[in-house]
Image (tube, helix red, strand yellow):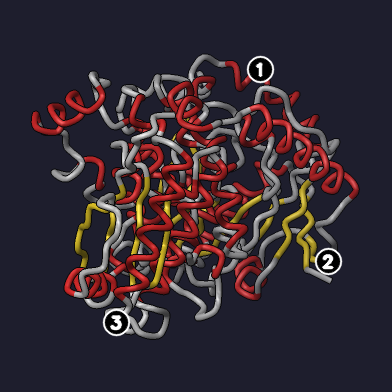
Amino acid sequence: MDEHFTPNIVGFLCNWCSYTGADLAGTSRLEYPPSLKVIRVMCSGRVDPVFILKAFLMGADGVLVGGCHPGDCHYQTNNYYARRRVALLKKVFETLGLESDRVRLSWISASEGERFKRVNTEFTEKLEAKGPNPTKAEVFL
Amino acid sequence: MPKVLKLNKGAEEGVRELLRFLLESGKVKGVLTLSKLNKNGAVAYLLITDPDALEDAVPLFPLMPANAAKLLSRLTLTGPANEPIAAVVRPCELRAFVELAKRSQGSMENMLFLSSTCGGVYPLEMATDGRIAEELPQYWEAIGKGDIASETRPVCKACVHFLPYTADITVGLIGNKNVGKECQLFLNTDKAEQLVAGFAGEVGEGNIESPELKQFHGKSEAEREKLFSEVQVEGIKGLVDTFGKCISCHGCSKVCPICYCKLCFFESEVGEYKSTGYDAEIREKGGVRVPPGTIFYHLGRLTHVSVSCVGCGMCTDVCPANIPVATIFDKTSQSVQEIFGYLAGKDVTEPVPLATFEKEEFSYVEE
């Protein structure tokens, strides 16, 4: 495996918690790996599984969905639906022999800059160990 | 003990007579049933109001020219049927319609559902070359004995939901050794009992469960296991091997009863590949398949329909590239529906899994 492999992670972060948590990590000057490419969504419930699939098939090594902790959703309950969708997608991946652990769902609140850093670092390290996403090398997708 | 109407007529003739009775007595105003188009064995669904037009009706013909759920959804999309309709459908079609009704794509009100213990249907390609007519005696003999008829579609052979869950009337086909001369119509609801009142034949008590039905179930289970282990998609390479042949006609979504979106995501502006999209992919990968996005399309469709997929097999039937779409969808959907403790189309009152949630669940996906 390439020693200098730095994974590419696409992160769908909800506006109210996880994205703000990422902001806090920034303003607190916390250091974390430069692997995450953030796409801000209004709510984790906005993330249609096809968004994750698209990123995955375009060669993202990992996809992170970040939302408010259960019970704290800005729109009351939409992160619960997000959780069901991620569970569904992971099941589809497992049935077809795809690597479901390249998809990660994490609850990060607006005050959890530290947690944002930890999630990002952990996920990056895990993907580094796994190596590049095989979709990167596949042109027939 | 459930009520059963015993007729000294063949199953098909019995159902036809019942439909005629319902129309003539004005108990229903329309009948949706398969009907013969010509002598080659081509059949199509027909919505009949004239009792005489029932002459060419073949309500139990083992072919699915369209999933009836899709047709019923079209008829009732804007509201319940304004006159009562009797529809003769297969168990999977009924399940698909239940799913559509739950998704506000149709209404089950003012409808009488006749279904049967289904022995499966033949592939669509056998519809016009006369082969079904040749196979028919063998078909009825096999399911009469509780065996799986040969030449039927692979997903039909592997179907374990051949006993309709929400039909008003169930025609007993599996285990009926004398299907050309006698038949039993199980009356599952009060509505069914009221509607058949006045129709010839004796109403008694009976049980739809029979040794033949049990045997059929066992054989289907075995077929299911076999089929699912044969059709394996393993990882990205497996997906390319299986779906790489796809010509992107999107026929599978056109015939899918669950794919009801008027504007499909994959046919929308968002799903379209612009030249910039090609550029990006070529830059990254050094090549791009044209037409692009076939794997994305199938995986995406799986995430969209798998909670409601009933494994009706229409997608495989129409695939010009001979991809076993239905088998893969059926298999994946089964495992998806299992995690939600759900079976598509079984229970009208149970919400579709993605439209509901529990506060404490799936903690294993949270990291």
Camera sees residue B55: no
Q: Residue at x 27, y 79 (%)?
A: A110
Which residue sits furthest left? B275
Q: Chain of mark 2?
A: B
Using the image, tell me which numbered label, if any, was put on residue A73: none
Q: Nearer the viewer, mark 1 or mark 3?
A: 3
Residue A114 position in % (x across, y down): 34, 73
Q: Residue at x 37, y 47 (%)?
A: A62
In the figure, is residue A122 to the left or right of B178?
Answer: left
Q: Residue at x 56, y 65 (%)?
A: B364
Q: Which of marks 1 and 2 precedes in the sequence?
A: 1
Residue A60 position in % (x across, y down): 32, 42
As rendered, which of B209 and A56 lies closer to the eye?
A56
Q: Which residue is mark 3?
A: A111
Give the class, few, some or many, for how many residues have Cα within 10 Å of label 2's Cα (few <14, many ≥20).
few
Q: In 3D space, how far apart are the residues under numbered discs 1 and 3 (Cα atoms)?
A: 72 Å
Q: Which residue is mark 1?
A: B134
Q: Nearer the viewer, mark 2 or mark 3?
A: 3
